[in-house]
Image (tube, rainbow, N blue to C red):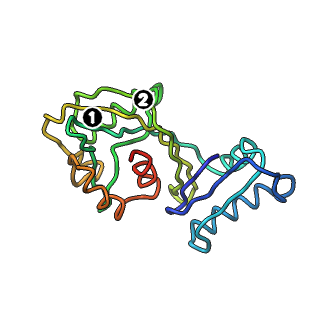
């Protein structure tokens, strides 16, 4: 299954019986669902069929971008969070040419938060979301990794990336994040509890 967030609204591509669109007008149906989600005409869309075929057709509608980031915890089990554009988020960013997702995740956390004593852990499931650049639709896959840090360093927000705040957040405060973050980040955090 693939879950893509379009303006915080889910579009699901699932294995199942072949839908009416799979053999006839699938690209058009997926594009319409994307546009309807993007414009708020619908709150959710689901397509069933050969999931890899659905994904291939959907992905072809977009420019593709890959990013990576971290769910970073300190010894007190506090999560490293950032605030960007008034919303809580996790440190992440676009992969550079030649970088592995792991290298990118570490680099982005270091750059965005000023933390450089990171230990890379296991991969967490990827998230997908869409946005537009100069009117063109973009589909972004973000690779996520569990990480640990001593939590002893001063946190330095990367202001040139519009990061307003960086802090270690106790799980008791996670509802604050859920109330003011993106749907894919909220889903990622819910999976950690």
Name the residue rendered at 23%, 29% in the picture: 116
**Which percent across, then down, holds residue 19?**
81, 56
- The earlier-in-sequence mark between 1 and 2 is 1
Residue at image mark 2: 122
- The one nearer the camera, 105 or 10, is 10
Label 1 vs label 2: CA separation? 18 Å
Question: Residue 180 location in percent, x, y?
Answer: 34, 63
Q: Nearer the viewer, residue 130 or 182?
A: 182
- Whether 75 is drawn above or below 186: the answer is above
On the rendered structure, is 101 left or right of 83? right
Assess disc 2: are there few (<14), some (14-19) or many (≥20) residues with their C-alpha within 10 Å of its C-alpha: few
Disc 1 + disc 2, Cβ < 8 Å: no
Q: Secondary structure at mark 2?
A: strand
Q: Position of residue 8 (x, y in %)?
A: 49, 62
- The crowd level at tag 1 (other Cα within 10 Å; few <14, some 14-19, many 20+) is many
Label 1 secondary element = helix
**Which mark is on residue 42?**
none
| Above or below, comparing residue 173 to residue 124 in the picture | below
Q: Which mark is residue 110?
A: 1
- The relative height of residue 10 versus residue 96 in the rendered view (above or below) is below
Residue 102 in percent (x, y) is at 42, 28
What residue is at 27 percent from the left and 28 percent from the top?
118
Foreground pick, 38 / 96: 38
Nearest-to-viewer mark from 1 and 2: 2
């Amino acid at each position: 299954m693939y879950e893509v967030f379009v303006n915080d609204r889910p579009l699901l591509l699932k294995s199942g019986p072949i839908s009416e669109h799979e053999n006839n007008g699938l690209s058009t149906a997926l594009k319409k669902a994307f546009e309807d989600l993007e414009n708020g005409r619908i709150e959710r869309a689901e397509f069933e069929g050969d999931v890899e075929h659905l994904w291939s057709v959907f992905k072809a509608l977009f420019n593709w971008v890959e990013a990576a980031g971290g769910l970073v915890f300190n010894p007190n089990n506090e999560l490293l969070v950032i605030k960007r554009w008034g919303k809580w988020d996790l440190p992440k960013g676009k992969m550079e040419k030649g970088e592995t997702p792991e290298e990118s995740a570490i680099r982005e956390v270091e750059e965005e938060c000023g933390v450089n004593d990171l230990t890379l852990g296991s991969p967490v499931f990827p998230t997908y979301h869409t946005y537009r650049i100069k009117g063109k639709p973009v589909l972004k896959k973000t690779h996520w990794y569990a990480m640990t840090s001593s939590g002893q360093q001063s946190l330095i927000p990367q202001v040139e990336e519009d990061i307003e705040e960086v802090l270690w957040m106790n799980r008791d405060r996670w509802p604050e994040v859920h109330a003011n973050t993106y749907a894919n980040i909220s889903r990622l955090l819910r999976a950690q509890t």
